Amino acid sequence: MPTTDFQPADAAFAERVRASFERQSAMATLGASLARVEPGEVEVQLPYAAHLTQQHGFLHGGIVGAALDSACGYAGSTLMPADVGVLSIEYKINFVAPARGQRFRMVGTVVKPGRTITVVEGRAYAIDDGREKLVATMSTTLMAIAGRDDIKH
């Protein structure tokens, strides 16, 4: 269930977000998929893959950060008008446990939407044998981008 009561500015927000995610080569390279799109909240899922781990066999922190950044960015995007994109301008990530699991889910939730600046929180969970464990938290600041041909919505 979404944890927000936000109203999207674009009635077709979910289709727009899904189409944008499909254009993201980085997420395709990681094997990530868009699992849920709600106003102000997005979930990205990622299966375990040995080639994405660090030397101890945990999902690499950079991979966790990249997937969580996408979840946060798309959460913010759900509330934007159809002709507005978003870019992360700052984020802080805290790794709270090793990212060990059969799959992972990253959830981005808008805290404060804005016309120019939006603040989003992210949570990354490792899922192993049906048990879910928080492995990272993220605080993200997004900037709305409009009127640029090089930014696709």
Image (cartoon, helix red, strand yellow):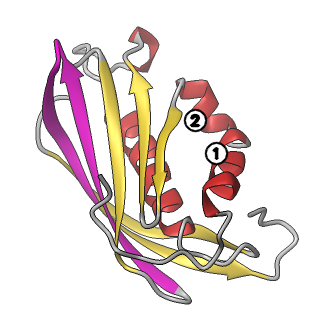
The residue type indicated by label 2 comes to: Met
**Rendered residue at 58%/35% (across/down):** 27
Choose top left, top right, bottom left or bottom right for residue 50.
top left
Q: Is residue 148 above or below residue 138?
A: below
- Magenta stretch: residue 136 in it? yes
* Residue at figure coordinates x 15%, y 40% from the top left: 134
Categorize mark 2 by other alpha carbons within 10 Å: few (<14), some (14-19), many (20+): some
User: Residue 131 in the image: x percent, y percent?
Assistant: 12, 23
Q: Which residues are magenta?
A: 117-138
Give the numbered dot on residue 95.
none
Q: Secondary structure at mark 2?
A: helix
**Mark 2 or mark 1: whose residue is earlier in sequence:** 1
- Give residue 27's mark: 2
Instruction: State which mark lies toward you, 2 or 1.
Output: 1
Residue 38 visible here: yes
The residue identified by callout 1 is 21
Q: Is residue 42 above or below residue 109?
A: above
Separation of marks 2 and 1 at Cα, in angstroms:
8 Å
Q: Are the residues at dot 2 and dot 1 in contact (C-beta closer than 8 Å)?
A: yes
Quadrant in the picture for the C terminus: bottom right
